[in-house]
Amino acid sequence: MIRTRLAALLSVAALALPLAAATAHAGTPAFRVLVFSKTTGFRHDSIPDGTAAIEKLGQEHGFAVDVTEDAAQFNDATLAKYRTVVFLSTTGDPLDQQSEKDAFQRYIEHGGGFTGIHAAADSGYTWAWYGNLVGAYFQDHPAIQQATVNVIGQGTPATRGLPNRWVRTDEWYNYRSNPRQNVRVLATVDESTYNPIGYTGGSMGDDHPISWCHPYDGGRAFYTGLGHTSESYTDPAFLSHILGGIEMTAGAAKFNCDPADTE
């Protein structure tokens, strides 16, 4: 079920729809975002914190936010209302019907946006199209600990204002492949700054992408591997990072995400 968050001055037609949005601006929101957090595998305790944080970002920045774990909302009519869809730590096979997958693929092909956060890469393992959309699949990770993120340039809305060497605590995903050939890498994690605590350590070497963006199949995609912890969703730097990703994929901010872009 989708929870009602929409401000009172939305049109009667919008209120009649089965979805409800969140915005603190009394006027018409600039665009609408769907946050999808269904899990069929591991479920992150931080999901409620993430949905609340994105709702607050919408309130502060003038876009409407709908929240759902109902995969049936992935149909042509519903998806057409959104400028970007956020996969917030989805796991397993959150879209388990082919009709849902087909509708989401059409949405992207017609210029829709995808914003993947953390375990969005731990999803859709049998769906190659989705794997290419997110950029890389999750492999494994060490225990949660502090590490240093190298932010590559300040020229995108998702990286602008972040420190070049960003020290933070998170769960540092290794990926099954390095996506660099097909995406613009926005940040890497320095494996020398954390330890193999638990059952693994960093396994991608000197080039360990942790956030990236790219045009894909007619649409726009952004992914960040950050965001495992609840504390992430009160961190102004991380919130700026995901706000930039949302606005970029929604077409509300510059999407300079060609793999060759350096600005």
Image: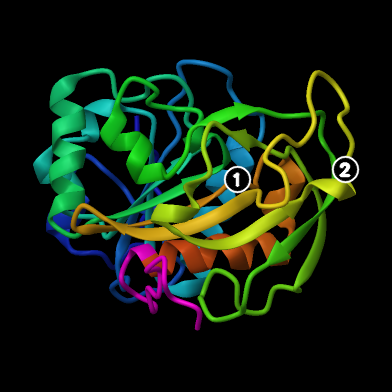
Three-letter code for the amino acid on which mark 2 is drawn? Tyr
Q: CA distance from mark 1 to mark 2?
A: 16 Å
Q: Which residue is mark 1?
A: 225
Badge count: 2
Q: Secondary structure at mark 1?
A: loop
- What residue do we see at 84% from left, 50% from top? 147
Overall secondary structure of the magenta stretch? loop
Residue 222, can we see it?
Answer: no
Three-letter code for the amino acid on which mark 1 is drawn? Gly
Give the residues in magenta. 249-263
Q: Which residue is at the front of the view, 248 or 36?
A: 248
Coordinates of residue 48 in the picture (x, y in percent): 59, 37
In the rendered structure, the answer to whether residue 86 lies left or right of residue 130 reads: right
The numbered disc on residue 194 is: 2
- What residue do we see at 30% from left, 30% from top? 128
Coordinates of residue 115 in the picture (x, y in percent): 42, 52
Q: Which residue is at the front of the view, 116 or 165?
A: 165
In the rendered structure, the answer to whether residue 226 lies left or right of residue 7 reads: right
Q: Which residue is at the front of the view, 204 or 60?
A: 204
